[in-house]
Image (cartoon, rainbow, N blue to C red):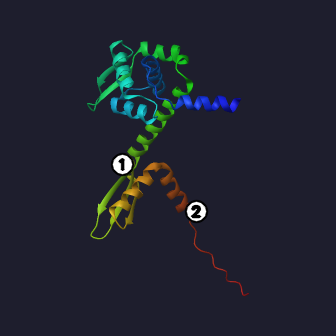
Amino acid sequence: MQDENIFKMSELADTEITDVPTLNILLCYLMYKIGHEVEADQLYDIAFSTGVVNYFTYQDSLGYLVENGLIEESKNSSGALSYSLLPKGESCARQLKSFAPKSYRDKLVLAALRYFARLKSQQEMKVEYIGLEKGCYVVIRCPDKEYDLMELKLFAPDMRQAKLLGERIMLDPAGFYGKIIELALSNEETKYDLTDN
């Protein structure tokens, strides 16, 4: 019986949201959990990465939230269209969250956490591709305030393989950097057996 309920819940979490009031609550809840201004493109990417948000419902919901003073639309310092949660929207998120299924709330918040973690790691590590006569260099830089913490150049036989290397590194840049440091610190000279046997 319990497995049956879990299956039904997971099925619900994969069903597209077509109900504007439910999405209103979910978007307010998402912005409340994020806790800061969100660029329009970021909010869009987060919502649609879940696979459960309907495009038309999303557009209707954003329009409703802006028109009714739950979120504010503005331009941020870089000129990008952004949304901020207003007190009325925060109240909606806190008081009405139980009217939106927890499976959807969790899915959206998890998507946001992944999105911002990926964004942060991409800002912390840079990947460049340098084409050569035969092959390509993948240059990985981990910049700090004044100096580069690491600069690593890898050779790839062609641009396709170079891009593949770069994409794999950017899946977990912090993990990649950590493994390089761990390898460097654990590296030892080969010990030779000098006993007469």
Earlier in the chain: of badge 2 and badge 1, it is 1
Residue at 53% x, 30% y is: 13
From the viewer's perspective, tell me whether residue 92 is left or right of residue 130.
right
Q: Position of residue 38 (x, y in %)?
A: 38, 28
- Secondary structure under tag 1 reads loop
Q: Quadrant of the C terminus?
A: bottom right
Residue 10: x percent and y percent? Answer: 58, 32
In the rendered view of the protein, which quadrant contains the N terminus?
top right
Local secondary structure at mark 2: helix
Question: Which residue matches tag 2?
Answer: 186
Disc 1: which residue:
146
Q: Quadrant of residue 160?
A: bottom left
The residue mark sitting in front, 2 or 1, is 2
Tell which of 9 and 126 is nearer to you. Answer: 9
145 with respect to 107 (left or right): left
Q: Find the residue positioned furthest to the right.
A: 197
Q: Position of residue 31 (x, y in %)?
A: 44, 24
Q: CA distance from mark 2 to mark 1?
A: 27 Å
Q: Which mark is residue 44?
A: none
Amino acid type of the residue that numbered disc 1 sits on in the rendered structure: Glu
The type of residue carrying mark 2 is Ser
